[in-house]
Image (cartoon, rainbow, N blue to C red):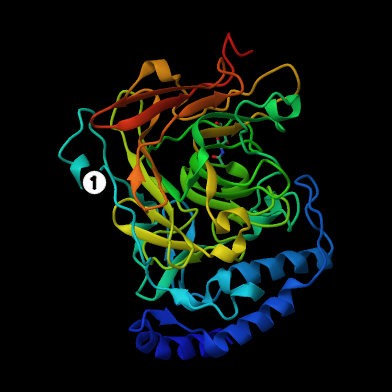
Amino acid sequence: MGTVAAQFSSSCWHQRRRRGLLSLGGVRARLLFLYLLVGGGGLISLSSAARPSSSKEKLQVQKHLKRLNKPPLKTIQSLDGDIIDCIHISHQPAFDHPFLKDHKIQKWPSYHPEGLYDENSVSEGPKERTNPITQLWHMGGRCPEDTIPVRRTKEDDVLRASSVKRYGKKKHRSIPKPRSTDPDLINQNGHQHAIAYVEGDNYYGAKATINVWEPKIRQPNEFSLSQIWILGGSFGEDLNSIEAGWQVSPDLYGDNNTRLFTYWTSDAYQATGCYNLLCSGFIQINSEIAMGASISPVSAYRNSQYDISILIWKDPKEGNWWLQFGSDYVLGYWPSFLFSYLADSASMIEWGGEVVNSVPEGKHTSTEMGSGHFPEEGFGKSSYFRNIQVVDSSNNLKAPKGLGTFTEQSNCYDVQTGSNGDWGHYFYFGGPGRNPNCP
Ligand SMILES: *[C@@H]1O[C@H](CO)[C@@H](O)[C@H](O)[C@H]1NC(C)=O
């Protein structure tokens, strides 16, 4: 079935892309059929202690893997153990979504926001020297045109999740809510943050250059990440969020590597959304960057510093939210219909770090945020976000007005903002977690 669909769409792909649109025609009908065929089964619960034993449970995992891993046109083995499958652009997981059956792939954003800082100027040298980054799997080859690289999900990846249904999803309520006095929100299931944010306006995107590190994770069920949040709505059950950055998550990936990731939800992490391409939603157009793949190299203490730039913006013509990585890679977009509030605009932008503290009551985890060092230490030692900008209603990148900061326990993880000519608005953030002041 995969081969027939591949032949069908590659023959019309070249004609149709000249018009800038790709209609999926018969492929979509077949994919929808596949979706209905494999997607409707019941859900099973897996605990990490008790792996599925019955053949029914094994079958559920296999079905889920079959749904996630589309037939590849080429396969690349990465040094970190990942397998990168080059999937035809019209066979990507997004098109399993029933609402996307008539979707025409948008080949390129209609508008691109204009910025204050040109990435190319970075090599001419801010005072602090930084370096560009790529992905580790590139050493094993590249994906052909009209395909997208997809990190293959292995059986073990799914088995590490609490259930097949929760695989690739965040736990509920992990959004930092500044100025909250609700004690439940101060320690949301152990999620801790150190962030900068803006609110009180309509935002159409955000950008930042994020220092990349490989923080130590104390327990496999914890994670550490650095990201941008694009938020819509209040902090209720219908919160909309689009997220991108880097993360270390042993549970999700089975190792301690630093990986590029995205996330989206339209209901505060309940039923909708997922990491990367692990559910239908994000539509990728780029053949060079794989979601969830390791980024390399990473920064070292008092040594070379590496950073990635991330831009998320709403195309004013089509309404979709686009994602760009670095200055060269437009990765793809989240269709506007996935969201309620974000179908119009964002009401808040957050930049910064998050960790999970799962150590039992009374003690704090030593999982690191950022570099594992506090902001006071500065460049080369503490992790940073630089050239922080927001996209306004005229599709211009602007300095954020009224940048606030928030952290639940500044003795564990902290944040400090500043601004200068080279870095515009920036902040240092993070920390070691457990220490004499954060027992
Ligand atoms: C990840 O790091 C922790 C310690 O920081 C270590 O105990 C664990 O074995 C590592 N996991 C893998 C898969 O390498």
Residue at 41% across / 33% down in the picture?
A: 401
Specify whether tag 1 is near ligand 1 (CB below 8 Å): no
Image quarter (top left, top right, bottom left or bottom right) of the C terminus:
top right
Q: Is residue 24 visible?
A: yes
**Please, which residue is most extreme toward the left here?**
124
Residue at 73% across / 72% down in the picture?
A: 39
Residue at 64% across / 71% down in the picture?
A: 67
Q: Is residue 366 left or right of residue 88?
A: right
Q: Is residue 183 left or right of residue 298?
A: right
Depicted 317 relative to depicted 7: above or below = above
Depicted 257 relative to depicted 401: above or below = below
In percent of width and height, residue 312 lies at: 43, 52
In percent of width and height, residue 66 lies at: 64, 71
Q: Is residue 281 visible?
A: no
Please state the total of marks drawn on the protein image: 1
Q: Amino acid at mark 1?
A: Asp
Q: Categorize mark 1 by other alpha carbons within 10 Å: few (<14), some (14-19), many (20+).
A: few
Q: Quadrant of residue 342?
A: bottom right
Residue at mark 1? 118
In percent of width and height, residue 286 lies at: 39, 65
Residue at 65% across / 81% down in the picture?
A: 32
